[in-house]
């Protein structure tokens, strides 16, 4: 079994290995690219596409580019990142470098979105890339990038454009997920897992995604009908009450961007999510999976909220990065998202820790610190920033998801009169 990352990341089967042969691999890679364009983006004829990707994702990026042009894209522009170049900055750059970001580039990306371009991100970077670097420099670089990218982030969190994120198996990431395998086997196994949880291991992946999307929409509709005022999470290390924003909306699966184009922002996705009230979160909560935050691993997070704000925060590893993250701005200490995911989701059932938020957040219920999605509020397109804040929507330079759910988590919906209704028991929906 071999993989050649420079010639399409092909996989050669070995008897009994359970891995894919090269022809099947290429078929599924192409299917992933097609689903990303047709279902994830819903790319419109004549629309531009801005894509970001690590260098190791070149074969998938090329497939996506081909399908985008077949769908009628007027122009595809891909911005590649190089992890070795990132490390060179931390090893050799002058100190003042870490307070700078390419603001001109981020402004250009935001300008592209304003002109109608779609956004596609390919995930797959090394989750531990910066684990051994100076936490202070990491935090400063992250803050500079967050500030520079705020114009583009605002357009994304308001769903002004259609966007999606998919993943590519890369050697550094695969070694993190499968540390006991040689690199080729690890990458092959990670690709196999990605194809399974992104539902492209069947002949009609597009229809499979549409069926899955319909189920998530049905779950979101149920929660919208119940109109809970809060959620109560109880599990190991967690006793947390999350108030929900006034006029909140639950979303799940796909959404229609404000440009009128339906899209599914995350592939995979197993969540239904909404906007918490930034001032109505109280209690303690512990992470159930590690968080990979911009190249640094943060494990065993424990925080306490009072009046919506984190007042205590600790972690077994990466605590310095966690503390600096929540000090990004005032909104970084408050919640911008709460999401429910059953413990029996395909990602959870895989038994894998992906060390990647795109996947791990879809294995467990989770919360996000920072910027709220304004689309999770009724009539949000008619509200300005002060009106959104008055309803409880948080504002921040960051939006960082971390996982709190597990097979030992119970969740209740709290009605306005204080009565409760069971939603999840031991991580599963109460039917």
Image (cartoon, rainbow, N blue to C red):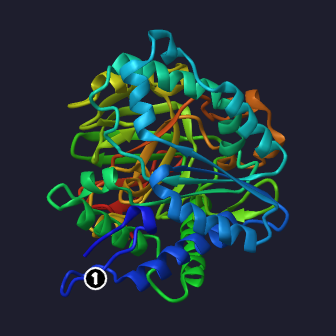
Please indicate whether residue 285 sits to the left or right of residue 208 in the image. left
In the image, 197 versus 107, the foreground residue is: 107
Vertical position of residue 199 compared to residue 202: above or below: above
Q: Residue at x 54, y 81 (%)?
A: 205
Image x and y of residue 239, in percent? 30, 40
Of residues 331 and 98, the one nearer the viewer is: 98
Q: Quadrant of the N terminus?
A: bottom left
* Residue at position x 31%, y 63% in the image: 187
Q: Is residue 351 left or right of residue 356?
A: left
Q: Residue at x 30, y 47 (%)?
A: 234
Left or right of 364 in this view: 110: right
Q: Tag 1: Cα neighbours inside 10 Å, few (<14), some, or many (≥20)? A: some
Residue 431 visible in the current orientation: no
51 up-or-down from 335: above or below:
below
| Quarter of image, res 108 | top right
Which one is nearer the viewer's eye here, 272 or 138?
138
Q: Say which quarter of the image contains residue 292.
A: top left
Q: Position of residue 129 (x, y in %)?
A: 34, 37
In the current view of this chain or complex, which residue is farthest to the left? 180
Residue 193 picture location, percent across and down: 34, 70
Q: Is residue 27 above or below residue 134?
A: below
Q: Is residue 94 visible?
A: yes
Mark 1: secondary structure: loop
Q: Tell me the residue that label 1 is attached to.
A: 13
């Amino acid at each position: 079994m071999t993989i050649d990352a420079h010639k399409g990341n092909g996989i050669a089967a070995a008897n009994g290995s359970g891995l894919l042969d090269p022809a099947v691999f290429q078929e599924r890679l192409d299917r992933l690219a097609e689903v990303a364009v047709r279902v994830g983006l819903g790319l419109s004829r004549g629309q531009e596409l801005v894509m970001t990707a690590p260098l190791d994702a070149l074969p998938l990026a090329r497939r996506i580019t081909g399908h985008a042009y077949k769908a009628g894209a007027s122009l595809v522009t891909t911005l590649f990142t190089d992890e070795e170049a990132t490390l060179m900055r931390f090893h050799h750059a002058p100190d003042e470098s870490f307070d700078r970001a390419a603001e001109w580039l981020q402004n250009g990306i935001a300008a592209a979105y304003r002109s109608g371009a779609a956004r596609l991100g390919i995930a797959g970077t090394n989750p531990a890339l910066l684990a051994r670097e100076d936490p202070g420099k990491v935090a400063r670089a992250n803050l500079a990038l967050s500030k520079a990218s705020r114009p583009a982030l605002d357009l994304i969190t308001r769903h002004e454009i259609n966007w999606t994120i998919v993943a590519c198996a890369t050697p550094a990431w695969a070694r993190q997920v499968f540390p006991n395998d040689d690199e080729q086997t690890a990458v092959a196994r990670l690709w196999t897992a990605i194809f399974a949880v992104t539902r492209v291991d069947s002949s009609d992946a597009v229809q499979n995604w549409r069926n899955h999307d319909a189920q998530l929409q049905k779950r979101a509709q149920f929660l919208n009908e119940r109109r809970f005022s809060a959620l109560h999470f109880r599990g190991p290390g967690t006793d947390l009450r999350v108030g929900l924003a006034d006029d909140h909306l639950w979303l799940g699966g796909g959404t229609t961007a404000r440009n009128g184009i339906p899209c599914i922002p995350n592939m995979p996705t197993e969540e239904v999510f909404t906007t918490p009230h930034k001032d109505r979160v109280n209690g303690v909560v512990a992470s159930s999976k590690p968080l990979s935050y911009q190249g640094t691993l943060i494990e065993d997070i424990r925080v306490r909220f009072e009046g919506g704000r984190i007042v205590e925060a600790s972690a077994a590893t990466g605590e310095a990065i966690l503390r600096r993250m929540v000090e990004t701005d005032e909104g970084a200490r408050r919640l911008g998202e709460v999401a429910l995911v059953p413990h029996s989701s395909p990602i959870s059932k895989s038994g894998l820790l992906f060390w990647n938020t795109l996947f791990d957040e879809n294995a467990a219920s989770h919360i996000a610190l920072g910027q709220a999605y304004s689309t999770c509020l009724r009539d949000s397109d008619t509200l300005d920033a002060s009106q959104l804040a008055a309803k409880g929507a948080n504002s921040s330079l960051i939006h960082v998801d971390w996982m709190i759910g597990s097979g030992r988590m119970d969740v209740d919906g709290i009605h306005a009169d204080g009565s409760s209704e069971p939603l999840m028991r031991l991580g599963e929906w109460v039917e």
